[in-house]
Image (spheres, rainbow, N blue to C red):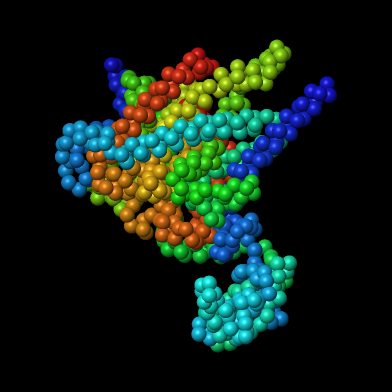
Amino acid sequence: MFLIRLKQFLFKLMVYALLLAGSALFIIPLVWMMSTALKPIEQTMSMPPSWLPYQLYAQVNGERVKVTRGELVEQPSLVVFDERLGMDYIVAQSSISEGHLIQRTSEDEELRIPVIVRAEIPGSEERPWMRVIPEVKAETETMEESGGAAAGHYGATWFVVPEDEVEREVSFRWENFGKAIRAMKYFPQYLRNTLILCLLTVVGTVSSSAIAAYGFSRIPWRGRNKVFLIALATMMIPFPVVMVPIYSMFRSLGWIGTLRPLWVGSFCAGAFNVFLLRQFFMTIPKDLSDAARIDGCSEFRIFWQIMLPLCRPSLMVVGLFQFMGTWNDFLGPLIYLTNQKDFTLALGLQFFQSQHGGTEWHYLMAASTLVGIPIIILFFFTQKTFIEGISMTGIKG
Amino acid sequence: MTKREWREFFTGLGFISPWIIGFLAFVLYPVGASIYYSFCDYDVLTRPVWIGTLNYQDMFTDEVFWKSLRNTLYFAAVSLPFGLVLALLVAILLNQKVKMRPGFRTIYFLPSLVPVVASSMIWLWILNGRFGLLNYALSFIGVEGPNWLSDENWTKPSIILMSLWGVGGSMVIYLAALQDVPRELYESAEIDGASSWTKFRHITVPMISPVLYFNLIMGIIGSLQVFAQPFIMFGGGGTNRSALFYAVYLYQNAFQYNQMGYACAMAWVLFIIILFLTWLATKGTRKHIYYAGE
């Protein structure tokens, strides 16, 4: 008995361990996206990375100021002023002799650069010092103007302080979102276009496939099942097969570069949605519509006043999936849209990446968050419909 | 037909008219035109010129075509089985009596909701050779991570990794099917002293086999047409075209090289490949699929 209990306990333990480890792996990319979105740029490129964005503070001239980190000084060093370059830099104490910086250029040649020693830094591996750069508050007060490293004391643009005196506080750069939006240039237009398309395609898909599904399920006309088989068969055709002719069709209509090709099709009931709704319509008893017919109800009224209210859940599923599909669609906008102002969010994000990719990861992640979050929020509000819809497509398909 | 039958016939047609219009404009005409274009030299700007089977012949000698086909089949052959098994595994774990099942389910499902452009950005960042999270994680176990996005040996695994992150959709389908398996079956098997594996093999698998089949077919169709992820992450196909996928090359032919006829021919070859593999999968699994209703 004890052994069985132990075995069950160990099994449970394993299930939870696997589930927890798995969820961590699945959620980390999203956490990482958010974390990067809230960091200043230099923290996106620091190794090891930190999960929580932070802000460094240092005591400078008796004042606690926000700073960004520079390199660590791990050996006794000097801040020197190089007259020829007109700037300060940090050099190891050992490389200075008699007011000159000694640079070995080859085996027996050395360069002697006259420098003025400004300060000593007692850095060591046990207690490293850190170069810190105060963050400028107002944008007008740029470093060049306020600083004057060339002219004055070295502390104007940067300072060197003991690393253990640098304080670190968690701080989120919410302003990254605003900056990313501005960097994307046409973000408001992208959002507007996406919402317009979502609205039109949801209305188009739900109305047209409900009407067609009604015709395929509630009216017994001759040849109905054969036509429905054709409808099912069209689901097999991959989009690339029809992509070129549809493109050239829209082209001859002069619709390339407009939003029209992206929503017109949704008003022509797609086979998949018709299939889904038909499955649902068929579960509703026939007597209901027969009774209405005897009372002299027109077919359209039966559809509108009896069927639609009863089928609201399945219409929600279709509408929700269409919304997601339009929001996420990439290939359609890529093919049909030519002006940047007409782009959708998905295409706009990709365009932004193709221009700024590789460096400004914090903006890219902020923009990705902005594109992804609405869908995730939508999911949380419609979770039940959602999961039911997915299961429905899988099981009944 | 009687008068009433005629009336019903026309009412029926009236109701399905949105579908009929769509069928004519977005299926029947394009399919016909696509077949025709595939035998033409066509650049969308001028009228198509009939060239016979030249497009199809070109495909045989087009090394880039073969490379894109190999890449795509490699991707499908790896991501499909791994994805199916991973999704099933997670679904089975979630089907145990666990606390907070909805919470776990949401976490596993969430990635599949993220718009593909956004998830491509996330993975570009995670797979970054210098500052990427993955290589940082690998450094803990003493592995110096490769340059995922520029090393031609690792570009396809990058896309596969990303696709595995999105298995939440099929996981939810499995989970729904698992929850539909009648408990009595397991209970009576337990009385007979069946082991966990036996129960899984002889109850679970047959009972959820329609869903296994559904996910397999959807997986074949989807993975052979994968476009957005490789297009966004590798643009023209990455180092040495190692991440040039079939649909991406097709897109390039159609919209970058203006070889619309060749693109159509490629699309038909893709369709035939999909049909063949679907047929193969159906043939291989038909005997093992159990439909409760039959």
Give residue B105's quadrant in the image.
Answer: top right
Give residue B59's quadrant in the image.
Answer: top left
Give the percent coordinates (x, y) of residue B44.
Answer: 22, 45
* Residue positioned 74% across, 34% down in the render: A13
Q: Is residue B119 left or right of residue A122?
A: left
Give the percent coordinates (x, y) of residue A178.
Answer: 52, 64
* Residue positioned 53% across, 33% down in the render: B82
The residue most toward the bottom is A151
The residue most toward the top is B192
Q: Which one is in front, B12 or A373?
A: A373
Res. B112 visible in picture:
no
Q: Is residue A29 left or right of residue A167?
A: left
Q: Which one is in front, A246 or A52?
A: A52
Depicted A134 relative to depicted B64: above or below: below
Res. B185 visible in picture:
yes
Give residue B62's quadrant in the image.
Answer: top left
Q: Which one is in front, B97 or B287?
A: B287
Depicted A204 relative to depicted A65: above or below: above
Q: How many discs appear?
A: 0
Give the percent coordinates (x, y) of residue B156.
Answer: 46, 42
Q: Quadrant of the N terminus of chain A?
A: top right
Depicted A309 relative to depicted A361: above or below: above
* Residue positioned 57% across, 49% down in the render: B144
* Residue positioned 61% across, 33% down in the render: B90
Give the percent coordinates (x, y) of residue A90.
Answer: 60, 76
The residue most toward the right is A2
